[in-house]
Amino acid sequence: MNNAIPYTNIHTHQATAEDELSIFNAPDHFDPCTSNIYVSIGIHPWNIEKVNSTECLDSIQTNASAKNVLAIGECGLDKLIDTDLKIQEDLFKQQIHIAESVKKPLIIHCVKAFDELIRIKKELNVSVPMIVHGYNNNEQIAVKLLENKFYFSFGKALLNEDSNASKIISIIPIGQLFLETDDTDIPIKSIFERASRYLQIDEAALKEKIYLNFKRIFTNE
C-alpha cells in the first residue's frame, strides 16, 4: 500500500513530479478554472504594494470555492519588509475571513511576527487550520504555536543539520506536520528522506502519515 502513496508537497512554486501530490502556490489573478492542478491562492505580504489588493481580494473571494483551490495563501505577516504592519494585518484578516467562509486552511508566511499571528488567531477565533509554512524558528516559538493549535510545514531548512527546523521537527506531533519545497527545485523526496531521519521513522511510513494529514486537512476526508 505504501508504494502507491505519493510524496505530499503542500507548498510549491514549481512544476511537480508524477509521484508527487502537491499544492501549487498560484500567482496573482490565477484562474483555477483554467487548471486541473491543486492550488492555493492568496496575497503574499511581499506583493501587497505590487498589486491592486482590492482586485486580488475579489479574485480570491470569487475563486475560493473552486474544488481545486485547497487553501488560502500564502498570506501573513513579515516584519522585515517596508509595508506597514497594520496594512499587512488588515489584508491578512480579510483573507482569513475568506478562508473561514469556505472552510479551507490557510498557508501562512510569518517572519518575526509570531506574537501578532497568535493574537490575530485568538482575536478572530479562527476555526480553519493555520499552517506556518517553511518553519525554521526556535523551539520556544514552536511551543507557543503548538499551544495555539497551529500546523507546521518544513522544507529546505531540514537539509541543514544545524538549522532550527532540523533541531525541533521531532517535537511536532505527526498529526500537525507537513513537508514542502517552496520556491526551490529540491525534490520533495529529499525533504522526506531528511525528515524521516530526524523523526526516526521509516520513509514509507512518513509518506503515509503526511498523506493522511493532507486528506484530513485539505480535503476533509
Image (tube, rainbow, N blue to C red):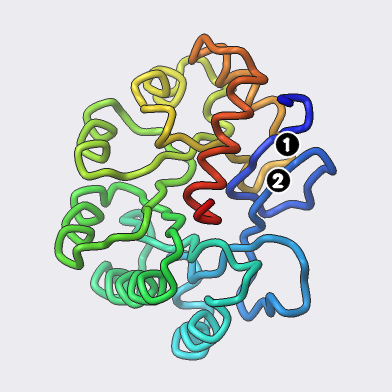
Identify residue type, mark 1: Pro
- Taking 55 as reference, is 115 above or below it? above
Q: Which residue is denoted by mark 2 in the rendering?
A: 21
Say above or below: 13 vs 160.
below
Q: Quadrant of the N terminus?
A: top right
- Crowding near the residue tagged with mark 2, few <14, some 14–19, many ≥20 C-alpha atoms within 10 Å: some
Q: Earlier in the sequence, mark 1 or mark 2?
A: 1
Q: Tell me if 196 is positioned left or right of 100 in this view.
A: right
Instruction: Give the mark count.
Output: 2
Q: Residues within 10 Å of mark 1 (few under 14, many from 20)?
A: some
**Secondary-structure class at tag 2:** strand
- Taking the spot 35% from the left edge, 54% from the top edge, the residue there is 80
Q: Is residue 21 above or below residue 30?
A: above
Relative depth, front residue between 186 and 34: 34
Residue in the picture at 56% in, 47% down: 215
Residue drawn 37% across and 51% down? 110
Tell me whether the residue at label 1 lies in contact with that at label 2, contact meaning CB atoms closer than 8 angstroms. yes
Counting from the top left corner in percent of width and height, residue 140 is at 22, 29
Q: Give left or right: position of 133 versus 80.
A: right
Could you say which quadrant of the image residue 86 lies in?
Answer: bottom left
Residue indicated by mark 1: 6
Residue extending furthest right? 18
Question: Which element is circle 1 on?
Answer: loop
What residue is drawn where x is 59% and y is 40%? Answer: 180
